Image (cartoon, rainbow, N blue to C red):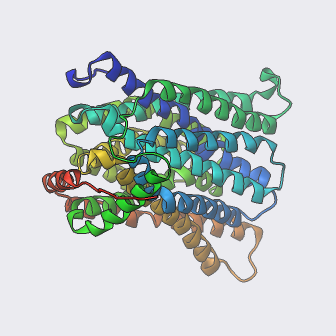
Amino acid sequence: MKIAKNDSTSAQRKSIWGWAIYDWANSAFATTVMAGFFPIFFKQYWSYGSDVNVSTAQLGLGNSVASLMVAVMAPILGSIADQGSMRKKMLITFAYLGVLMTAALFWIQKGQWSWAILVYALGIVGFAGANIFYDALLPLVSKEQNIDRVSSLGYALGYLGGGLLFLLNVLMTLMPQRFGLPDEGMAVRISFLMVAIWWGCFTLFTVFWVSEPKSTQKGSKGRFIVIQGLRQFIGTFKDFRHLKTVFIFLLAYWCYIDGVDTIIRMAVDYGLSLGFEANDLITAILIVQFVGFPAALMFGMLGQKWGVRKSIYLAIGVYMLVTLWGTMMSNPIEFYGMAMMIGLVQGGIQALSRSYYARLIPKSRSAEFYGFYNMLGKFAAIIGPALIAIVGLLARNLMMPAAPSAEEVIYFGRLASRWGIASILLLFAAGAVCLYFVDEEKGRREAAYLESKKFEISITD
């Protein structure tokens, strides 16, 4: 990737690459665990013998509970991290929580769905919690002139790194004996361990290469940091009238990223509900990863040349078409086509949303504001999977005959799943409408005002 002159010093380039490599590291969890093997293994191994719609509901609600935990603590932890220049330390803490929980999946036995959901939920807390502080470091490692490309570089490396490890893991499950493994189930469990090792090792580049400016505030040590952070968090609500642009953007983001996150987390489960083979779904995920690598880089350039907001609208439009197509698809070839379309825009909408938001917030309070950003993202992830679960179960109960035959159970179960996936169209539409009312220039003025405010705190022991 070509770095602009403002980001051309050796230390700056090293910091940018150290930051971007974290996406390479943690995307293994997003691909192999979240999008790939966990939904399949949960349905076929940990929830063995359960009804297909019940296991979908368990998975959807498990995702929602984990997202709620992150959402509640995100902005408060962000405020504290801002005060003590602790963004990087917080990233490391949450990242290695996720690493440990991912490794722990190896030891969960068949039928232990409750343990699987608990450990998986804590893994999501680590993954999503670290992302708060990872995002918050973006305005500090890159100048604004290059921020769209740097943000896109992170997502591009994530698609490539996550895709490569996932490809290896898929080959292990298809040919376990070639890798010295007894069966497919053991291959999946070993894959969870490999994700943990991959995530933990590549995070070390972020640990050693990314530098964070030290806090210049008085009393920025120990318990003073916590008190100052809480005061800053409270002060943000007092200044709410100066946050109108940020609020409108976050509302838009909340809606459309819900659809994106829901498709990421529930697409495999949806395909299984329609009767597709697990290998077909895994192939679709690999398509997303390897199409997503160059597409994310191209979206970064598109955002700079054509405009970030127009590019986000393009991605939303593609997602709406994909969702409509998903309600009607009937064979794996269509699933592959949808995967290619998603790969073209998934990294782009994520990367450009992150960099666009950086233009609307004060840099010195990036962790707090990215806490709100991730908080609403996680609340969106609560609504999306839960919406699919609730709409699917309601549709199934309303349509299912009183004494259904085996064929009717399968038919109406699949029809209910289609209704569930259709429900997220509302969120894409709402996000597009809200984004129309975002005024970037007004947002910059609001950010400049908040940057100038000093939260001076007098504390005595």
Which quadrant holds residue 28? top right
Q: Is residue 415 left or right of residue 295?
A: right
| Residue 294 vertical placement versus 422 (above, below) | above
Residue 57 screen position, x and y as percent: 64, 65
Outermost residue toward the top in this view: 10
Residue 365 screen position, x and y as percent: 32, 49
Foreground residue among 430 and 2: 2
Q: Is residue 152 visible?
A: yes
Foreground residue among 162 and 273: 162
Residue 222 screen position, x and y as percent: 50, 48
Q: Residue at x 23, y 49 (%)?
A: 309
Q: Residue at x 55, y 67 (%)?
A: 386
Q: Is residue 83 left or right of residue 421?
A: left
Outermost residue toward the front in this view: 461
| Residue 80 vertical placement versus 181 (above, below) | below
Foreground residue among 172 and 153: 153
